[in-house]
Image (cartoon, grey):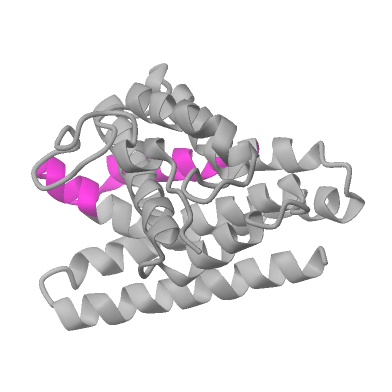
Amino acid sequence: MIETIDHGAICMGEPAGNGGPGRSGPATPAGVVHALARLATGADAHRRGAGAGPVNRLLSALAGTVGGGRAHDPEFGGALVVELARRYLQAVRDHARGTAVPRVWQVVLDAWADPGAEPGRITLVGAHALVGHDLPPAVVSTCTLLGRTPGPAERGDLQATVALLAYLACDAAGRSADAATREEATGLELVLARGEPWRQAEHLWTVRGRPSETERDRDALDRRAALVVRGVLAAGS
């Protein structure tokens, strides 16, 4: 059986190459909002290649807030959100094609493929995946792209991003019709804001010139995030 890949997941809203050297996809927070808006109908219909509707809305809300100037450093904060979206959209595209994706996104996107998936719980696991898996390497990529070294200013924007993602996810999941999802949403902010993403980003920065070590550590991030996501999903089954 051949599944149709949503066209928006391939184009990701902007012409290829706008994301920087060797990159494709949205180049600005506004571009992220536009790209995700194009996927909205397919995502809410659980169409393969359009992403998970709750995660799309979470990222779109994050990009819209940063795009409105709410960041400690607009250049870094905006570029970081664009990089987060780029990683997510790449996973969506690869998942649709049946090629390898990070374990954590395989779990999240497979869960959303079920039309009976509870949106609030998908929001929770999407937030865990973005913060626990994508955010640390996104900091490294963004610093590299902007010619920066991770420091207090970049840490401030990472923490602001985590806090905003937690708030948005808690708000969405807290309105769920599922009591267990609402209960789990109350602890999300505490779990995500423990400082782990920054420590992981700093570590990945120190090993960035050692490919085998970097690959091993990123694989560990993926495995850890996937375990958390599977646990959250299992708790709601």
Closer to us: 5 or 84? 5
Residue at x 33%, y 34% (from the top left corner): 77
In this picture, residue 89 sits left or right of residue 103: left
Estimate the x, y position of residue 149 in percent, counting from the top left.
Answer: 16, 50
Residue at x 48%, y 55% (from the top left corner): 3
Residue 143 appears in the picture as rendered: yes
Seen in the picture, residue 53 relative to 189 is either above or below; the reply is: above
Q: Main secondary structure of the magenta part?
A: helix
The residue at the far front in this view is 1
Estimate the x, y position of residue 199 in percent, counting from the top left.
Answer: 38, 64
Query: For the magenta stretch, what is the residue range?
Result: 141-167
Seen in the picture, residue 104 relative to 21 is either above or below; the reply is: below
For the C terminus, the quadrant is: bottom right
Residue at x 30%, y 25% (from the top left corner): 74
Seen in the picture, residue 58 relative to 218 is either above or below; the reply is: above
Estimate the x, y position of residue 194 in percent, counting from the top left.
Answer: 55, 58
Residue at x 72%, y 53% (from the top left corner): 121
Estimate the x, y position of residue 119 in percent, counting from the top left.
Answer: 72, 45
